[in-house]
Image: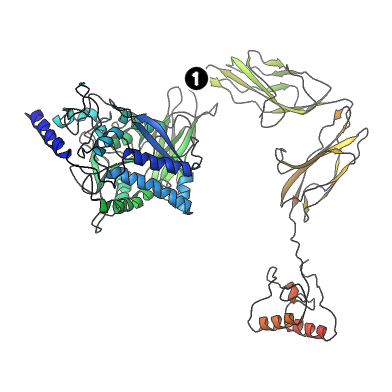
Amino acid sequence: MIRTTTILTVLILYSFSLSQTLPDKYHTYAEGIAELDSLAGSHPGICSLDSVGYSNRDSLTIYLFKISDNVSLEEDEPAIFFNGGVHADEVLSVEVVLNFCQDIIAQYDSGNTAVQGYVNDYEIFVVPFTNPEGHTVVEGGDTEWRKNKTDNDGNGIFDFHDGVDPNRNYDFGWDLDTGPEATTPESLTYKGPYPFSESETRTVRNLGILYKPIIAVDYHSPTYGRPEVLYYCWYWDIYGFAPDELTMRHIGQEFGAMIVTDSGDSTYEARRGLVNKGDFKTYYYGNFGTAAFVVEISDTTIQDTSMVDGICERHLPGMYYLLERAGYARLSGIATDSLTGLPLEAEVEVLEATGPEINPRYTRANTGRYDRLIDPGTYSLRFQKDGYITKTVSGVVVSNLYVTYTDVQLLPENVVPETPQLIYPPDQIVYYDSTHLSFDWSSSAFAEEYIIEIADNEQFSPIFEEDSNLVNSDYRNISPFAQERYYWRVTASNSNGYSDRSEVWVFNIVSSSAPAAPVLISPPDSFESSAPYLDFDWSDVADADNYAIEIASDQQFDNVVESDSALTLSEYQNVDSLPDDDYYWRARAGNANGWSLYSEVWTFSVDAEPNIVYIPGDVNHSGDVNGLDVIYLVNYFKGGPPPPLEVEGFYPEADANGSCDVNGLDVLYLVNFFKGGSPPIDGNCLD
């Protein structure tokens, strides 16, 4: 009897809805996607539009609109998710999220620093049409259609027997939804034959698994139930309130308070949602710890077109509040393997906000990052992963003023090798004319293999030679060495992982016929220069035919700002003006047999004084001294504008008598000058 009544109700609604049409004010699926594609085309640096899935029956593309700096990259940034168009007839949800996409890009373009910060700091994702095939049904005139178009009876005909409610098809809570409205295929809220039977919900699930958003909002309109309300997580009749009850309630209340109702005299109510079905917010909170919300927009599904723009605008403050809220009272950090430094997909448990009813919350697999919004307080975090020793960090303080970062390194449960100790060649040794060397290091306990790395730079990028399959603790290089400075290190490994890298040792290869290294003379070490040009000098070296100099802004000489390797004299003056900064320099000598080692490295700094050109007595800075300067100076003493050229409160061109002070005597001095007296004097007061 219940099933018969449900089918009859659906038939009545179905026949009535076919006489309706979707007003032109509302976006069709094609129009909405075209609008976002245009945005992505005009702002390729901060937004993109990509396919992330397809609808269950018609295979219409489900598009994801991403807003972030470096939008083409998967950055290590918190994810925020806005979802629309889940229920086909609730077209206001599409309008709200499309309007947000337009507005945030416009605010970014206008120079809104807060919005620019959100775009730079977060990855913002929007799915405007989660149920695109259902939306096209509404576009075609069936304005009461809610579900997708899954062919429930398998007859190949789309009719009222078909469709699954995408917001009843998630696995978390699916088993609790057992009433006829959930199990009858003709019902508007049919949950499907099994969890994630629908490609639409699988798409949204996959986004959650990949990005684990800290905030996710699913926009709806009330087909039935309360209008202008948002629901946060949760109350469960088995377990009670959510482990994060206070946090979810506080964020929900602030979120709702930012959205003004259609009447304009109140704001959206924040209510605690129930765990009684497989819906979006329950799935995202239960699996990822996401601050997940469902928002019921306005008081009907297809609102009067004159109200649409106002409704969309009134929802923007709530959306921007969530972006702001993501930036404080947040736990964040990275879990890595303590030996390799690689990110781990580890479980992160907040001991003060956990329970048996929620699934483990994991870090993001590609970065090891976790992010979770939580009320200010002091917490204990437990990190665990199979094969690793569980680690608990206590006394983690969360504040409303900042994000709290707690990185952890997890130690594998099984023993890894000890760190090798280098033996030969000795550190800093110099070899003459050698092209091949024998390397030796200590045998490490529990080691199965070794990795040796040899490079001609401290960063080991690029690597000169590497071998990762050594079973013995010795090695002889294959590629011949050039006359250069080399760095080497060794790592031990076994099936459980890697040891720490050994310390780095250095050896030098030089020609026996090459000159000795020069000795630096001038400028002296740690010299402070007030000029951007300097004279460099070093000792003459016997048998040297030429010299080379390098000037860099870093001690490793990765950023060489000036160099010359064709000098015939042991001196040099930089060609380009050096900006104010700290610098390092070194020199070496060469001849037909090769280069010497570099000299030791000396430092200097440049803090150049400005070159100020002025004419004493030219008070008005006209480029000439005449009677107008007297008038200008008199007016200044009467309260007029000061002389144009000012240096740290002093007016050098008005100091006509060179006294290093500007007063009435300078007026008398200028008058006497024009009567045949002495010309204005430069007191060199800027020295």
Q: Is residue 681 left or right of residue 293?
A: right
Closer-to-camera residue (28/311): 28
Q: What is the magenta segment's predominant secondary structure? A: loop
Of residue 15 and residue 431, the one placed in the foreground of this image is 15
Badge 1 crowding class, 10 Å Cα cut-off, few under 14, some 14 to 19, many 20 or more, is few
User: Which quadrant: the N terminus?
Assistant: top left
Which residue extends farthest right?
A: 542
Please check the rendered image and state whether residue 298 is part of the magenta-colored stretch, yes or no.
no
Q: Which portion, as a residue range, is magenta?
A: 539-543
**604 lies left or right of 368:** right
Is 553 situated left or right of 385 in this image?
right
Q: Position of residue 256 (x, y in %)?
A: 29, 50
Q: Quadrant of the C terminus?
A: bottom right
Counting the numbered discs, the total is: 1
Q: Is residue 550 visible from the viewing direction of this image?
A: no
From this view, report whether residue 517 is shown above or below residue 662. above
Colour pattern: rainbow
Query: Where is residue 396 shown, x and y percent of the image?
Result: 43, 42
Please determine whether, in this image, residue 50 is positioned above or below residue 633: above
Q: Residue at x 81, y 20 (%)?
A: 434
Q: Is residue 685 left or right of residue 336?
A: right
Mark 1 lies on a secondary structure that is loop
Which residue extends farthest top? 471
**Where is mark 1, residue-wise?**
414
Residue 455 to residue 298: above or below: above
Instruction: Please state which amino acid type lies under the numbered disc 1.
Output: Asn
Residue 217 appears anywhere in the view: yes
Q: Position of residue 554 (x, y in %)?
A: 70, 42
Residue at the spot x=50%, y=26% of the render? Answer: 411
Locate residue 481: give its quadrant.
Answer: top right
Whole-percent x and y of residue 430? 81, 26
Q: Residue at x 91, y 39 (%)?
A: 540
